Image (cartoon, grey):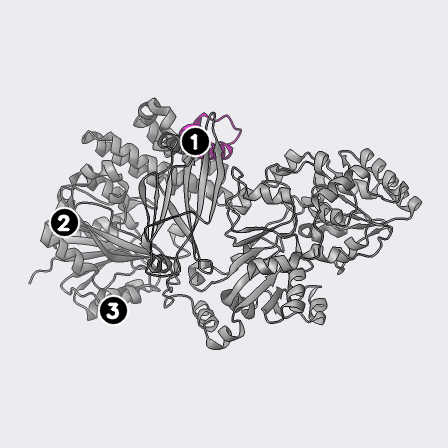
């Protein structure tokens, strides 16, 4: 029986991976094949190992190169040397499923067609990161005909999933690219594309692409790598011109421009590429575009270019930019592209009235509510929510402001739909007389949102061990219905601590735990008080994270609510996330808050509450999630001692001055630029000035200088006189209670002082607009001049005058500011913790 198929395998220094690869070949269900191993002058034991395999399996043949030829030339040697009817390729650090060859050869024989199938991308530790799915194609197709609809790119990649007629490649001199550091296979496919008259694309997965951490696909690209991809695009242009189909080449090149110019920009951000690299890559990209007159064709529709051809738009904007460096030109062009695409997207919504796409993205198991979302222009279309034939109103609705055009507005419509109690009851939603994906019984809806157990067989050993321990009966019993509290990993003394204390004293039946670093200065204090403490980052913390039903925190950092990776543990988490907040929101924080999935969100003032939940605001949060309860720590500020002759200085942080962050806790790297910044120099100038020191001595006041926790590491670099106290392990609450005046710039701690009917002086040497820009915030409802609890000072002279003015009157809160305070805090009943408890219970 003749052998119908050859697998060509180029080998260079692959001794580590050959055993498992060869095993995957030997386990193939189809047995009548040959393997042509070509050793490309390996310097390890690969050649010896290949000879050993060939001596025991007659299907294995080995060719040896005296000198290293490179991958492309090796594959071409394989094509020229193959005598079987069909040929395919594989890399020896990847794997073939057992039926890989069988399904491809069977399809080739059945359909008399070139075969393309699907593949998986898998990390070296066994995690599936991408599962390729067959496009919506006829069973047999001609790629050049279908590429107008789905694009040519799917037919110009993943050559290890193909099965080729050997004669077609040899007859038409269709070979891999040579002297290429990457994309040699794509080079071959661009030559092949217009020769394919019949292709069958199988849904079967025939190849496992293993993404090693040291492989080319996961490490740095040099300019040569990008040039190799553009070289393939140039070839495809040439072939497309021959076949009178240059539009396909534009589509192909556009996809590569978009992907690889953004990839290059990411490398710049990661420190892997420099200005010279960007100049070279942009120059090479422009050369291909100029050669084939891409801009001449596509600029005729310049208005829609960003939407239809984003890659060309990105290159065009970069080339026409006048920024001083090519990196800046590319970065600014990326921003312009995003803005254009966004506007075009919204204009299409405007034309249609709404986006015709209703998404169902969240299910509240306890309240039996499902969330629906879609975009609309100005007025939302008619909605009909039916439950067992009866028309129902949504439980909660919100029109979230998304975009304001010249004469129109785009909103996101958010609906929380109450499901019936019975699993067999049927629910459906239509929007604008169009059926949506919600047309099922309650049981089906519930099942669709239930996390499917992850297959952890190929996960790292430590991951599997943690998963199994977290699901053990002992751990589930210990942390049954647990509530996990955390302020910062390094500190307590915030709203989580205060709510925990209330729970501990008033609801002892709650299985409550408090997470904190064991080395924190606050650990002994809480331990003495009887808090059930768990060390942050410990095994107990990890297990509690999975088993807790409530995660309650004053912070909204990713290390709080996404402590462990969803790719390994996403099926185990069950908690509702309750954001107690760190303070009262004054600015518009929607760009940040909208990215966090929260179940309960605590607010304090009427204006704050409505700035978030009202229609036409920028927040996606609704009345379902947002409560107006007041902050837990404010309960402890009602019964306060008489203030001492002490005032509190607390500037808030600046995001652009914080050091690098690994995302695993509060601690950041030291930033040597901080102390030389305008921010640090201005505050240093105030507290070290002779006039400031003289005021402290004259009126016998003590100052407490407590910058934001993000700047705690720089405290020793400020010039503090003996009258200025540098707190160490003290409670911020205790110091606030005994302070009579606050000096800050933009800190929300001003609301804590106001709650105690004490004034603030705002030292805002940088404008609110500048501060908001540096913090990636937008100005909000709160005006410091109209709503603040004290005067706003812009210069050192102004603030010195106001400090003396307050000192000379015993720091009494002036009438106009006291009036504002009493209006904001008209409820001061000490029941904030109780209200929050009932909201999250």
Do we see residue 824 in this rendering? yes
Extreme residue in the front direction: 390
Mark 2: few/some/many CA within 10 Å (<14, 14-19, 20+) = some
Where's residue 6, x and y in %? 17, 57
Query: Mark 2 or mark 3, which is nearer to you?
Result: 2
Where's residue 40, x and y in %? 29, 55
Q: Which residue is label 2 attached to? A: 165
Extreme residue in the bottom direction: 474
Where's residue 515, x and y in %? 61, 65
Mark 3: few/some/many CA within 10 Å (<14, 14-19, 20+) = few
Image quarter where the N terminus lies is bottom left
Q: What predominant SS class does the magenta segment belong to?
A: helix
Q: Tell me if residue 319 is in the magenta stretch.
A: yes
Q: Is residue 255 left or right of residue 486?
A: left
Q: Which residue is label 3 attached to? A: 52
- Which residues lie in the magenta part? 314-342
Query: Mark 3 or mark 1, which is nearer to you?
Result: 1
Where's residue 11, x and y in %? 29, 57
Judging from the image, what secondary structure is the residue with disc 1 in? helix
Judging depth in this view, the residue of 294 and 181 nearest the camera is 294
Q: Is residue 758 left or right of residue 360?
A: right
């Amino acid at each position: 029986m003749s052998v119908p198929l050859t697998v060509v395998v180029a080998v260079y220094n692959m001794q580590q991976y050959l055993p498992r690869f060869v095993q995957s070949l030997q386990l193939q269900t189809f047995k009548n094949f040959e393997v042509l191993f070509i050793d490309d002058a390996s310097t390890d034991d690969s050649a010896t190992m290949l000879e050993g395999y060939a001596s025991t399996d007659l299907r294995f043949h080995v060719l040896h190169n005296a000198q290293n030829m490179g991958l492309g030339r090796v594959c071409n040697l394989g094509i020229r040397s193959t005598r079987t009817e069909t040929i395919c390729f594989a890399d020896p650090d990847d794997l073939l499923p057992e039926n890989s060859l069988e399904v491809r050869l069977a399809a080739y024989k059945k359909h008399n067609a070139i075969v393309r199938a699907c593949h998986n991308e898998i990390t070296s530790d066994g995690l599936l990161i991408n599962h390729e799915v067959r496009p919506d194609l006829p069973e047999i197709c001609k790629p050049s005909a279908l590429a107008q609809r789905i694009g040519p790119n799917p037919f110009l990649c993943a050559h290890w999933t193909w099965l080729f007629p050997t004669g077609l490649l040899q007859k038409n001199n269709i070979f891999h690219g040579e002297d290429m550091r990457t994309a040699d296979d794509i080079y071959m496919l661009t030559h092949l594309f217009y020769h394919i008259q019949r292709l069958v694309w199988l849904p079967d997965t025939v190849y496992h692409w293993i993404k090693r951490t040291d492989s080319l696909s996961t490490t740095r690209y040099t300019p040569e790598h990008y040039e190799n991809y553009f070289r393939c695009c140039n070839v495809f242009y040439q072939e497309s011109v021959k076949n009178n189909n240059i539009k396909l080449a534009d589509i192909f090149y556009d996809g590569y421009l978009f992907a690889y110019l953004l990839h290059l920009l990411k490398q710049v951000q990661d420190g892997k590429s420099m200005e010279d690299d960007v100049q070279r890559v942009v120059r090479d990209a422009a050369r291909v575009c100029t050669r084939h007159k891409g801009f001449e064709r596509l600029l005729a529709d310049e208005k829609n270019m960003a939407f239809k051809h984003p890659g060309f738009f990105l290159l065009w904007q970069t080339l026409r930019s006048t920024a001083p460096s090519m990196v800046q030109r590319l970065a600014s062009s990326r921003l312009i592209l995003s803005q254009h695409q966004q506007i075009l997207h919204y204009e299409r919504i405007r034309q249609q009235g709404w986006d015709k796409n209703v998404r169902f993205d969240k299910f509240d198991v306890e309240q039996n509510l499902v969330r629906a979302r879609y975009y609309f222009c100005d007025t939302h279309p008619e909605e009909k929510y039916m439950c067992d034939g009866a028309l129902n109103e949504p439980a909660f609705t919100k029109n979230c402001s998304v975009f304001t055009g010249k004469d129109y507005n785009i909103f996101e419509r958010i609906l929380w739909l109450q499901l019936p109690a019975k699993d067999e009851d049927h629910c459906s939603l239509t929007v604008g007389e169009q059926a949506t994906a919600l047309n099922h019984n309650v049981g089906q809806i519930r099942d669709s949102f239930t996390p499917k157990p992850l297959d952890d067989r190929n996960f790292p050993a430590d991951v599997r061990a943690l998963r199994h321990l977290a699901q053990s009966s002992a751990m589930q019993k210990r942390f049954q219905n647990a509530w996990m509290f955390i302020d910062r990993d390094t500190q307590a003394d915030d709203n989580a601590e205060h709510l925990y204390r209330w729970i501990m004293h008033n609801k002892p039946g709650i299985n409550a735990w408090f997470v904190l670093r064991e080395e924190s200065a606050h650990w002994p204090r809480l331990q003495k008080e009887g808090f059930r403490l768990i060390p942050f980052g410990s095994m107990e913390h990890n297990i509690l994270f999975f088993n807790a039903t409530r995660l309650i925190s004053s912070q909204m950092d990713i290390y709080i609510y996404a402590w462990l990776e969803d790719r390994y543990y996403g099926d185990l988490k069950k908690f509702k996330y309750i954001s107690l907040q760190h303070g009262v929101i004054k600015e518009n924080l929607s760009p940040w808050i909208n990215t966090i999935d929260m179940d309960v969100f605590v607010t304090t003032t009427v204006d704050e509450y409505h700035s978030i939940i009202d229609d036409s605001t920028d927040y996606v949060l609704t009345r379902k999630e947002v409560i107006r309860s007041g902050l837990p720590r404010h309960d402890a500020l009602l019964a306060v001692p008489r203030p001492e002759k002490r005032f509190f200085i607390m500037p808030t942080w600046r995001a652009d001055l914080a050091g690098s962050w690994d995302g695993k806790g509060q601690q950041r790297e030291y930033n040597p630029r901080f102390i030389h910044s305008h921010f640090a120099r201005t505050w240093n100038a105030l507290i070290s000035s002779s006039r400031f020191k003289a005021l402290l001595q004259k009126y016998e006041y003590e100052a407490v200088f407590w910058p934001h926790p993000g700047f705690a590491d720089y405290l020793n670099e400020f010039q503090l006189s003996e009258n200025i106290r540098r707190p160490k392990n003290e409670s911020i609450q205790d110091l606030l209670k005994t302070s009579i005046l606050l000096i800050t710039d933009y800190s929300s701690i001003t609301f804590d002082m106001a709650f105690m009917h004490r004034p603030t002086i705002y030292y805002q040497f940088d404008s609110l607009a500048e501060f908001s820009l540096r913090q990636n915030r937008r100005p909000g409802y709160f005006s410091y001049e109209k709503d603040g609890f004290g005067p706003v000072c812009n210069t050192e002279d102004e603030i010195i005058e106001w400090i003396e003015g307050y000192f000379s009157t015993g720091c009494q809160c002036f009438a106009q500011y006291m009036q504002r305070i009493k209006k904001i805090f008209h409820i001061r009943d000490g029941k904030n913790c109780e209200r929050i408890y009932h909201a999250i219970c």
